[in-house]
Image (cartoon, rainbow, N blue to C red):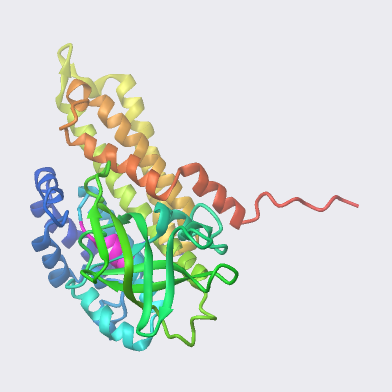
Amino acid sequence: MDAAFTAEQDEIRRTLRELLAKRCGPDEVKAAVRTAAGYDRELWKQLAERLGLPGLSLPAAYGGVGCGSAELALACEETGRTLLPSPLLATAALVAPLITALGTEAQRTALLPAVAGGTLTATLAVPGGSLSAALALTGDNTGGEWAGGGRAGGVQARRTDDGWRLYGEAGQVLDGHSAGLLLVAAHTGGFARSRVLLFLVTAGAPGLSCVREVALDETRPQARVELREVAAELLGSEESAETADVPGTLAAVGRTVAAVLAAEAVGAASHSLERTVEYVGAREQFGRPIGSFQAVKHRLADLYVQVQAARSAAYYAAWDPAAGALALAQALEALRTTAGEAVQLHGGIGFTWEHDAHLYFKRAASDELLFGPVHRLRARAAEVADLFEPKEPAV
Protein backbone atom coordinates (compact mmCIF):
# COMPACT_ATOMS: atom_id res chain seq x y z
CA MET A 1 0.00 0.00 0.00
CA ASP A 2 1.26 3.47 -0.95
CA ALA A 3 -0.02 5.81 1.76
CA ALA A 4 1.23 8.97 0.05
CA PHE A 5 -1.35 11.21 -1.58
CA THR A 6 -1.03 12.27 -5.18
CA ALA A 7 -0.69 15.88 -6.26
CA GLU A 8 -4.31 15.83 -7.45
CA GLN A 9 -5.56 14.53 -4.09
CA ASP A 10 -3.56 17.17 -2.21
CA GLU A 11 -5.05 19.82 -4.52
CA ILE A 12 -8.59 18.63 -3.75
CA ARG A 13 -7.88 18.91 -0.04
CA ARG A 14 -6.22 22.35 -0.30
CA THR A 15 -8.84 23.91 -2.55
CA LEU A 16 -11.75 22.62 -0.50
CA ARG A 17 -10.18 23.72 2.80
CA GLU A 18 -9.58 27.23 1.49
CA LEU A 19 -13.12 27.58 0.19
CA LEU A 20 -14.74 26.25 3.35
CA ALA A 21 -12.56 28.48 5.53
CA LYS A 22 -14.07 31.48 3.76
CA ARG A 23 -17.67 30.31 3.47
CA CYS A 24 -18.32 27.85 6.28
CA GLY A 25 -17.42 29.27 9.68
CA PRO A 26 -19.47 28.41 12.79
CA ASP A 27 -21.80 31.38 12.30
CA GLU A 28 -22.42 30.43 8.66
CA VAL A 29 -23.10 26.83 9.68
CA LYS A 30 -25.66 27.90 12.28
CA ALA A 31 -27.36 30.20 9.78
CA ALA A 32 -27.44 27.53 7.05
CA VAL A 33 -29.05 24.81 9.17
CA ARG A 34 -31.91 27.13 10.05
CA THR A 35 -32.91 27.66 6.42
CA ALA A 36 -35.73 25.65 4.86
CA ALA A 37 -33.29 23.41 2.99
CA GLY A 38 -30.99 22.94 5.97
CA TYR A 39 -27.89 23.94 4.00
CA ASP A 40 -26.49 26.84 1.98
CA ARG A 41 -27.75 26.29 -1.57
CA GLU A 42 -25.36 28.86 -3.04
CA LEU A 43 -22.35 27.20 -1.41
CA TRP A 44 -23.55 23.80 -2.62
CA LYS A 45 -23.81 25.20 -6.16
CA GLN A 46 -20.30 26.59 -5.89
CA LEU A 47 -18.92 23.27 -4.62
CA ALA A 48 -20.57 21.49 -7.55
CA GLU A 49 -19.50 23.93 -10.26
CA ARG A 50 -15.98 24.73 -9.08
CA LEU A 51 -14.91 21.41 -7.58
CA GLY A 52 -17.36 18.88 -9.01
CA LEU A 53 -17.88 17.61 -5.46
CA PRO A 54 -21.19 15.70 -5.96
CA GLY A 55 -19.72 13.85 -8.95
CA LEU A 56 -16.26 13.30 -7.53
CA SER A 57 -16.51 9.51 -7.58
CA LEU A 58 -18.89 9.21 -10.57
CA PRO A 59 -17.62 8.03 -13.97
CA ALA A 60 -16.78 10.73 -16.49
CA ALA A 61 -19.29 9.16 -18.90
CA TYR A 62 -22.07 10.44 -16.64
CA GLY A 63 -20.62 13.88 -16.04
CA GLY A 64 -18.54 12.94 -13.01
CA VAL A 65 -14.90 13.63 -12.22
CA GLY A 66 -13.94 9.96 -12.45
CA CYS A 67 -12.13 9.70 -9.12
CA GLY A 68 -12.69 7.00 -6.53
CA SER A 69 -13.73 6.52 -2.93
CA ALA A 70 -10.35 7.75 -1.67
CA GLU A 71 -10.89 11.22 -3.15
CA LEU A 72 -14.44 11.35 -1.80
CA ALA A 73 -13.17 10.40 1.66
CA LEU A 74 -10.51 13.12 1.51
CA ALA A 75 -13.14 15.67 0.55
CA CYS A 76 -15.39 14.53 3.41
CA GLU A 77 -12.52 14.87 5.86
CA GLU A 78 -12.46 18.57 4.96
CA THR A 79 -16.25 18.96 5.12
CA GLY A 80 -16.14 17.22 8.49
CA ARG A 81 -13.69 19.81 9.85
CA THR A 82 -16.28 22.56 9.40
CA LEU A 83 -19.35 20.32 9.88
CA LEU A 84 -20.54 21.48 6.46
CA PRO A 85 -24.33 21.04 6.20
CA SER A 86 -24.86 19.61 2.73
CA PRO A 87 -26.55 16.72 0.88
CA LEU A 88 -23.14 15.33 -0.09
CA LEU A 89 -23.27 12.16 2.01
CA ALA A 90 -26.81 11.17 1.02
CA THR A 91 -26.42 12.10 -2.64
CA ALA A 92 -22.85 11.16 -3.56
CA ALA A 93 -22.06 8.35 -1.10
CA LEU A 94 -25.45 6.65 -0.73
CA VAL A 95 -27.70 7.10 -3.76
CA ALA A 96 -25.32 7.67 -6.69
CA PRO A 97 -23.45 4.33 -6.22
CA LEU A 98 -26.76 2.46 -5.93
CA ILE A 99 -28.06 3.97 -9.17
CA THR A 100 -24.74 3.17 -10.84
CA ALA A 101 -24.81 -0.45 -9.66
CA LEU A 102 -28.50 -1.35 -10.03
CA GLY A 103 -30.02 1.18 -12.42
CA THR A 104 -30.66 0.65 -16.09
CA GLU A 105 -28.60 2.55 -18.63
CA ALA A 106 -31.57 4.84 -19.24
CA GLN A 107 -31.87 5.59 -15.50
CA ARG A 108 -28.15 6.25 -15.14
CA THR A 109 -28.13 8.54 -18.16
CA ALA A 110 -31.16 10.47 -16.93
CA LEU A 111 -30.14 10.87 -13.28
CA LEU A 112 -26.38 10.74 -12.77
CA PRO A 113 -25.40 13.82 -14.84
CA ALA A 114 -27.85 15.92 -12.81
CA VAL A 115 -26.40 14.47 -9.59
CA ALA A 116 -22.84 15.18 -10.74
CA GLY A 117 -23.78 18.75 -11.67
CA GLY A 118 -25.34 19.43 -8.28
CA THR A 119 -28.77 20.22 -9.71
CA LEU A 120 -30.33 17.03 -8.32
CA THR A 121 -29.95 15.93 -4.71
CA ALA A 122 -31.05 12.49 -3.58
CA THR A 123 -31.36 10.36 -0.49
CA LEU A 124 -32.02 6.78 0.61
CA ALA A 125 -35.25 6.21 2.56
CA VAL A 126 -35.10 3.14 4.79
CA PRO A 127 -38.07 2.25 7.05
CA GLY A 128 -37.63 2.30 10.79
CA GLY A 129 -34.56 4.52 10.83
CA SER A 130 -32.43 1.41 10.33
CA LEU A 131 -29.89 2.83 7.89
CA SER A 132 -26.90 1.15 9.54
CA ALA A 133 -28.64 -2.24 9.39
CA ALA A 134 -29.66 -1.73 5.75
CA LEU A 135 -26.02 -1.04 4.87
CA ALA A 136 -24.93 -4.16 6.81
CA LEU A 137 -22.78 -2.08 9.15
CA THR A 138 -24.27 -3.43 12.37
CA GLY A 139 -25.82 -6.71 11.25
CA ASP A 140 -26.66 -9.05 8.40
CA ASN A 141 -29.04 -7.36 5.95
CA THR A 142 -29.90 -10.36 3.76
CA GLY A 143 -33.12 -11.22 5.62
CA GLY A 144 -34.69 -7.83 5.04
CA GLU A 145 -35.97 -7.48 8.62
CA TRP A 146 -34.47 -3.98 8.71
CA ALA A 147 -37.07 -2.89 6.12
CA GLY A 148 -40.07 -4.13 8.09
CA GLY A 149 -41.88 -7.30 7.19
CA GLY A 150 -45.11 -9.17 6.85
CA ARG A 151 -48.28 -7.65 5.44
CA ALA A 152 -47.67 -4.41 7.30
CA GLY A 153 -44.71 -2.44 8.50
CA GLY A 154 -42.04 -0.66 6.55
CA VAL A 155 -42.93 0.37 3.02
CA GLN A 156 -44.99 -1.95 0.83
CA ALA A 157 -44.80 -1.92 -2.98
CA ARG A 158 -47.51 -3.30 -5.23
CA ARG A 159 -47.78 -3.47 -8.98
CA THR A 160 -50.82 -1.87 -10.64
CA ASP A 161 -51.95 -1.42 -14.21
CA ASP A 162 -50.14 1.92 -14.43
CA GLY A 163 -46.94 0.92 -12.61
CA TRP A 164 -45.69 0.53 -9.05
CA ARG A 165 -47.32 2.11 -5.98
CA LEU A 166 -45.72 2.55 -2.55
CA TYR A 167 -47.44 2.75 0.82
CA GLY A 168 -45.75 3.23 4.20
CA GLU A 169 -43.34 5.50 5.98
CA ALA A 170 -39.67 5.92 6.81
CA GLY A 171 -38.09 8.01 9.54
CA GLN A 172 -34.65 9.56 10.03
CA VAL A 173 -34.16 10.01 6.28
CA LEU A 174 -31.05 12.11 5.69
CA ASP A 175 -31.97 15.36 3.88
CA GLY A 176 -35.33 13.81 3.06
CA HIS A 177 -37.19 17.12 3.22
CA SER A 178 -35.00 18.80 0.60
CA ALA A 179 -33.98 15.95 -1.73
CA GLY A 180 -35.24 16.08 -5.30
CA LEU A 181 -35.16 12.28 -5.58
CA LEU A 182 -35.87 9.56 -3.05
CA LEU A 183 -34.58 6.01 -3.35
CA VAL A 184 -37.04 4.01 -1.25
CA ALA A 185 -36.47 0.49 0.07
CA ALA A 186 -39.79 -1.36 -0.09
CA HIS A 187 -41.15 -4.88 0.29
CA THR A 188 -42.78 -6.55 -2.69
CA GLY A 189 -43.95 -10.02 -3.66
CA GLY A 190 -46.58 -10.60 -0.98
CA PHE A 191 -46.17 -12.13 2.46
CA ALA A 192 -44.79 -15.53 1.43
CA ARG A 193 -42.29 -14.32 -1.19
CA SER A 194 -41.56 -10.88 0.21
CA ARG A 195 -38.27 -9.32 -0.82
CA VAL A 196 -36.76 -5.84 -0.70
CA LEU A 197 -36.35 -3.77 -3.86
CA LEU A 198 -35.40 -0.15 -4.42
CA PHE A 199 -37.73 2.37 -6.04
CA LEU A 200 -37.25 5.89 -7.42
CA VAL A 201 -39.69 8.54 -6.21
CA THR A 202 -39.60 12.14 -7.38
CA ALA A 203 -40.05 14.91 -4.82
CA GLY A 204 -43.51 16.43 -4.97
CA ALA A 205 -45.18 13.26 -6.21
CA PRO A 206 -48.90 12.97 -5.26
CA GLY A 207 -49.28 11.17 -1.93
CA LEU A 208 -45.70 11.89 -0.82
CA SER A 209 -45.08 13.85 2.38
CA CYS A 210 -41.58 14.79 3.57
CA VAL A 211 -41.44 16.64 6.89
CA ARG A 212 -38.21 17.73 8.55
CA GLU A 213 -37.75 16.23 12.00
CA VAL A 214 -36.17 17.83 15.04
CA ALA A 215 -32.71 16.28 15.20
CA LEU A 216 -29.98 16.39 17.83
CA ASP A 217 -27.47 17.42 15.17
CA GLU A 218 -28.91 20.21 13.03
CA THR A 219 -25.99 19.95 10.61
CA ARG A 220 -27.24 16.46 9.64
CA PRO A 221 -30.92 17.21 8.75
CA GLN A 222 -33.40 14.34 8.89
CA ALA A 223 -36.98 13.96 7.76
CA ARG A 224 -39.99 11.66 8.09
CA VAL A 225 -41.19 10.41 4.73
CA GLU A 226 -44.79 9.19 4.33
CA LEU A 227 -46.01 7.50 1.16
CA ARG A 228 -49.71 7.01 0.40
CA GLU A 229 -50.11 5.13 -2.87
CA VAL A 230 -47.21 7.05 -4.40
CA ALA A 231 -46.25 6.28 -7.99
CA ALA A 232 -42.70 4.91 -8.16
CA GLU A 233 -40.24 3.55 -10.67
CA LEU A 234 -38.34 0.35 -9.99
CA LEU A 235 -34.58 0.86 -9.87
CA GLY A 236 -33.35 -1.45 -12.60
CA SER A 237 -35.38 -3.35 -15.13
CA GLU A 238 -38.44 -5.47 -14.41
CA GLU A 239 -36.65 -8.47 -15.92
CA SER A 240 -33.68 -8.19 -13.55
CA ALA A 241 -35.79 -7.59 -10.44
CA GLU A 242 -35.97 -11.29 -9.54
CA THR A 243 -32.19 -11.76 -9.67
CA ALA A 244 -31.00 -8.36 -8.42
CA ASP A 245 -28.88 -8.69 -5.28
CA VAL A 246 -30.19 -5.62 -3.44
CA PRO A 247 -28.84 -6.60 0.03
CA GLY A 248 -25.41 -7.37 -1.41
CA THR A 249 -25.29 -4.07 -3.27
CA LEU A 250 -26.39 -2.17 -0.17
CA ALA A 251 -23.66 -3.91 1.84
CA ALA A 252 -21.02 -3.00 -0.77
CA VAL A 253 -22.15 0.63 -0.75
CA GLY A 254 -22.21 0.50 3.06
CA ARG A 255 -18.51 -0.32 3.18
CA THR A 256 -17.67 2.77 1.14
CA VAL A 257 -20.08 4.91 3.16
CA ALA A 258 -18.35 3.74 6.35
CA ALA A 259 -14.96 4.77 4.96
CA VAL A 260 -16.32 8.19 3.96
CA LEU A 261 -17.98 8.68 7.34
CA ALA A 262 -14.78 7.66 9.11
CA ALA A 263 -12.83 10.33 7.24
CA GLU A 264 -15.53 12.89 8.00
CA ALA A 265 -15.45 12.05 11.73
CA VAL A 266 -11.65 12.28 11.75
CA GLY A 267 -11.86 15.74 10.20
CA ALA A 268 -14.33 16.84 12.87
CA ALA A 269 -12.26 15.35 15.70
CA SER A 270 -9.04 16.90 14.38
CA HIS A 271 -10.54 20.37 14.13
CA SER A 272 -12.17 20.10 17.55
CA LEU A 273 -8.77 19.17 19.03
CA GLU A 274 -7.03 22.06 17.24
CA ARG A 275 -9.55 24.56 18.62
CA THR A 276 -9.11 23.13 22.12
CA VAL A 277 -5.31 23.36 21.94
CA GLU A 278 -5.60 26.95 20.79
CA TYR A 279 -7.97 27.78 23.66
CA VAL A 280 -5.89 26.22 26.47
CA GLY A 281 -2.85 28.05 25.11
CA ALA A 282 -4.61 31.40 25.50
CA ARG A 283 -6.73 30.84 28.63
CA GLU A 284 -4.81 31.75 31.79
CA GLN A 285 -5.29 30.51 35.33
CA PHE A 286 -3.04 31.32 38.29
CA GLY A 287 -1.03 33.61 36.01
CA ARG A 288 -0.15 31.02 33.36
CA PRO A 289 -1.88 29.32 30.38
CA ILE A 290 -3.86 26.29 31.48
CA GLY A 291 -2.25 24.39 28.61
CA SER A 292 1.03 24.50 30.50
CA PHE A 293 -0.34 22.33 33.31
CA GLN A 294 0.87 18.75 33.11
CA ALA A 295 -2.60 17.24 33.63
CA VAL A 296 -3.95 19.19 30.66
CA LYS A 297 -0.95 18.23 28.51
CA HIS A 298 -1.53 14.56 29.24
CA ARG A 299 -5.19 14.77 28.27
CA LEU A 300 -4.37 16.56 25.03
CA ALA A 301 -1.60 14.08 24.21
CA ASP A 302 -3.99 11.16 24.65
CA LEU A 303 -6.49 12.86 22.35
CA TYR A 304 -3.82 13.50 19.73
CA VAL A 305 -2.79 9.83 19.69
CA GLN A 306 -6.41 8.71 19.42
CA VAL A 307 -7.18 11.09 16.55
CA GLN A 308 -4.02 10.13 14.66
CA ALA A 309 -4.80 6.43 15.05
CA ALA A 310 -8.32 7.06 13.75
CA ARG A 311 -6.91 9.02 10.80
CA SER A 312 -4.61 6.13 9.87
CA ALA A 313 -7.54 3.72 10.01
CA ALA A 314 -9.71 6.06 7.91
CA TYR A 315 -7.03 6.46 5.25
CA TYR A 316 -6.59 2.70 5.07
CA ALA A 317 -10.36 2.26 4.69
CA ALA A 318 -10.39 4.84 1.89
CA TRP A 319 -7.88 2.60 0.08
CA ASP A 320 -9.67 -0.63 1.07
CA PRO A 321 -13.36 -0.04 1.95
CA ALA A 322 -13.60 -3.57 3.37
CA ALA A 323 -12.07 -2.09 6.53
CA GLY A 324 -14.68 0.68 6.60
CA ALA A 325 -16.72 -0.56 9.58
CA LEU A 326 -13.69 -0.86 11.87
CA ALA A 327 -12.35 2.51 10.74
CA LEU A 328 -15.76 4.08 11.38
CA ALA A 329 -15.89 2.60 14.88
CA GLN A 330 -12.47 4.01 15.72
CA ALA A 331 -13.25 7.42 14.19
CA LEU A 332 -16.61 7.75 15.97
CA GLU A 333 -14.97 6.85 19.26
CA ALA A 334 -12.23 9.42 18.67
CA LEU A 335 -14.77 12.11 17.80
CA ARG A 336 -16.91 11.34 20.83
CA THR A 337 -13.92 11.47 23.19
CA THR A 338 -12.41 14.59 21.61
CA ALA A 339 -15.70 16.48 21.53
CA GLY A 340 -16.41 15.60 25.16
CA GLU A 341 -12.96 16.69 26.28
CA ALA A 342 -13.32 19.91 24.28
CA VAL A 343 -16.40 20.81 26.30
CA GLN A 344 -14.57 20.00 29.51
CA LEU A 345 -11.35 21.85 28.70
CA HIS A 346 -13.19 24.98 27.59
CA GLY A 347 -14.39 25.27 31.17
CA GLY A 348 -17.56 27.15 32.04
CA ILE A 349 -18.00 28.65 28.59
CA GLY A 350 -17.74 25.19 27.03
CA PHE A 351 -20.83 24.07 28.91
CA THR A 352 -23.02 26.78 27.41
CA TRP A 353 -25.25 25.31 24.72
CA GLU A 354 -24.44 28.13 22.33
CA HIS A 355 -20.68 27.47 22.26
CA ASP A 356 -19.21 26.06 19.05
CA ALA A 357 -17.84 23.04 20.92
CA HIS A 358 -21.39 21.70 21.15
CA LEU A 359 -21.69 21.50 17.37
CA TYR A 360 -19.01 18.80 17.42
CA PHE A 361 -20.42 17.16 20.53
CA LYS A 362 -23.85 16.86 18.88
CA ARG A 363 -22.32 15.50 15.68
CA ALA A 364 -20.49 12.81 17.66
CA ALA A 365 -23.63 11.73 19.51
CA SER A 366 -25.86 11.87 16.44
CA ASP A 367 -23.53 9.91 14.16
CA GLU A 368 -23.17 7.14 16.68
CA LEU A 369 -26.96 6.91 16.94
CA LEU A 370 -27.38 6.88 13.16
CA PHE A 371 -24.51 4.63 12.11
CA GLY A 372 -23.41 2.81 15.25
CA PRO A 373 -23.10 2.22 18.09
CA VAL A 374 -19.37 1.59 18.14
CA HIS A 375 -19.54 -1.79 19.86
CA ARG A 376 -22.00 -3.09 17.24
CA LEU A 377 -19.82 -1.89 14.38
CA ARG A 378 -16.91 -3.82 15.86
CA ALA A 379 -19.04 -6.88 16.60
CA ARG A 380 -20.29 -6.98 13.00
CA ALA A 381 -16.75 -6.59 11.64
CA ALA A 382 -15.61 -9.48 13.83
CA GLU A 383 -18.56 -11.57 12.66
CA VAL A 384 -17.77 -10.93 8.98
CA ALA A 385 -14.12 -11.83 9.59
CA ASP A 386 -15.14 -15.07 11.40
CA LEU A 387 -13.01 -14.13 14.38
CA PHE A 388 -15.20 -16.01 16.83
CA GLU A 389 -15.99 -19.11 14.78
CA PRO A 390 -15.70 -22.27 16.92
CA LYS A 391 -12.56 -24.21 16.10
CA GLU A 392 -12.50 -27.91 15.50
CA PRO A 393 -11.11 -29.81 18.48
CA ALA A 394 -7.57 -31.05 18.04
CA VAL A 395 -7.30 -34.78 17.34
Q: Residue furthest top?
A: 286
Which one is nearer the viewer's eye here, 204 or 285? 204
| Residue 5 seen in this snapshot | no
> Residue drawn 49% across and 51% down?
326
Q: Quadrant of residue 72?
A: bottom left
Residue found 27% across the figure and 54% down from its top: 223
Whole-percent x and y of residue 3? 40, 61
Q: Is residue 169 left or right of residue 320?
A: left
Q: Residue at x 32, y 56 (%)?
A: 173
- The residue drawn where x is 51% and y is 78% is 244
Q: Is residue 29 magenta?
A: no
Q: Is residue 232 left or right of residue 391?
A: left
Q: Is residue 59 above or below residue 76?
A: below
Horizontal side of 11 relative to 378 (left or right) equals left
Instruction: Please report the bounds of the magenta region as a residue range.
Output: 86-93
Q: Point out residue 151 in the picture as x, y percentages from the top left corner.
A: 51, 63
User: Percent x, y for residue 204?
Assistant: 20, 69
